Image: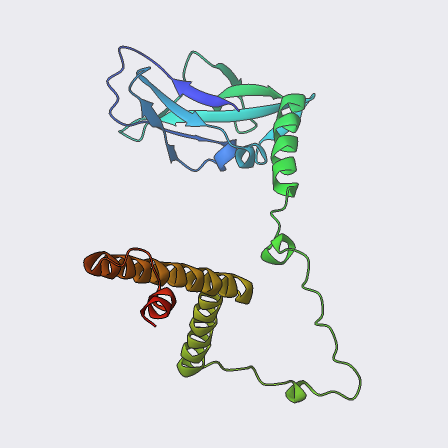
């Protein structure tokens, strides 16, 4: 892009404007660049549409206007006399450079932003139809499980677990019979030992030794 610049270190201008064929000679305020200590105006593509073209060049005619509304030209730019006999500053731009700038702007404008409908994903598939002769209202109602049903189920599970534990702790019939036989044999042996002890003790007291009652009876007779 082109820029009209007015730069004079000795200038004490507090405001400066510019007018030209690009603005159809309407006065436009310039911007003061404090870093460069200069006044600037940026030429836009729309401004170029108002300028004349000759010999493959675009001609930009302009003049400066100071704070006292005095129109003047700057010696840093070329000058030309227009058809009305007025002296103006002039800038020349190659049409090829301006066409390149314009083309880039057009390319950006041609890049359409997709609307909301284009940004949406693929449409949702249609719902699966019901079998023939079946209405959607004929569907079975959902099964509702109450709190009491849950408690009853938990109680049944706990009771079943208790029964399994009891069965695992209970000995089988074969083990029970063996235990009973062993206990009976041991009891009889203990009882015989006690009887023999008291019998020997009794016989010892009365001096009968180891004789039994049958022998003692035969001797007495």
**In this rendering, position of residue 80 left or right of residue 12:** right
Camera-side residue of 58 and 138: 138
Q: Residue furthest front?
A: 221
**In this rendering, position of residue 209 left or right of residue 89:** left
Rendered-image quadrant of the C terminus = bottom left
In the image, residue 180 lies at what x, y percent? 46, 65
* Residue ID at (48%, 63%): 181
* Residue ID at (71%, 65%): 125
Q: Residue furthest right?
A: 132
Q: Is residue 99 visible?
A: yes
Q: Is residue 171 visible?
A: no
Q: Quadrant of residue 209?
A: bottom left
Camera-side residue of 182 and 201: 201
Camera-side residue of 205 and 57: 205
Q: Is residue 156 above or below residue 36?
A: below
* Residue ID at (72%, 70%): 126
């Amino acid at each position: 892009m082109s820029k009209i610049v007015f730069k004079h270190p000795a200038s004490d201008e507090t405001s400066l404007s510019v007018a030209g064929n690009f603005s159809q000679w309407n006065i436009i305020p310039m911007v003061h660049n404090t870093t460069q200590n200069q006044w600037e105006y940026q030429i836009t593509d729309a401004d170029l549409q108002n300028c004349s073209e000759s010999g493959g060049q675009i001609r930009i005619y302009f003049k400066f206007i100071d704070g006292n509304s005095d129109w003047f030209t700057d010696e840093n730019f070329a000058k030309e006399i227009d058809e009305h006999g007025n002296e103006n500053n002039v800038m020349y731009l190659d049409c090829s450079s301006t066409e390149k700038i314009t083309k880039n702007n057009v390319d950006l404008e041609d890049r359409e932003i997709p609307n909301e409908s284009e940004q949406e994903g693929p449409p949702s598939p249609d719902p699966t139809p019901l079998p023939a002769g079946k209405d959607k209202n004929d569907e079975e109602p959902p099964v509702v499980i109450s709190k009491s049903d849950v408690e009853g189920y938990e109680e049944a599970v706990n009771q079943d677990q208790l029964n399994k534990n009891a069965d695992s702790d209970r000995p089988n019939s074969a083990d029970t019979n063996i235990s009973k036989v062993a206990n009976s044999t041991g009891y009889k042996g203990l009882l015989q030992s006690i009887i023999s002890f008291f019998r020997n003790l009794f016989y010892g007291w009365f001096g009968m030794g180891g004789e039994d009652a049958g022998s003692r009876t035969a001797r007495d007779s």
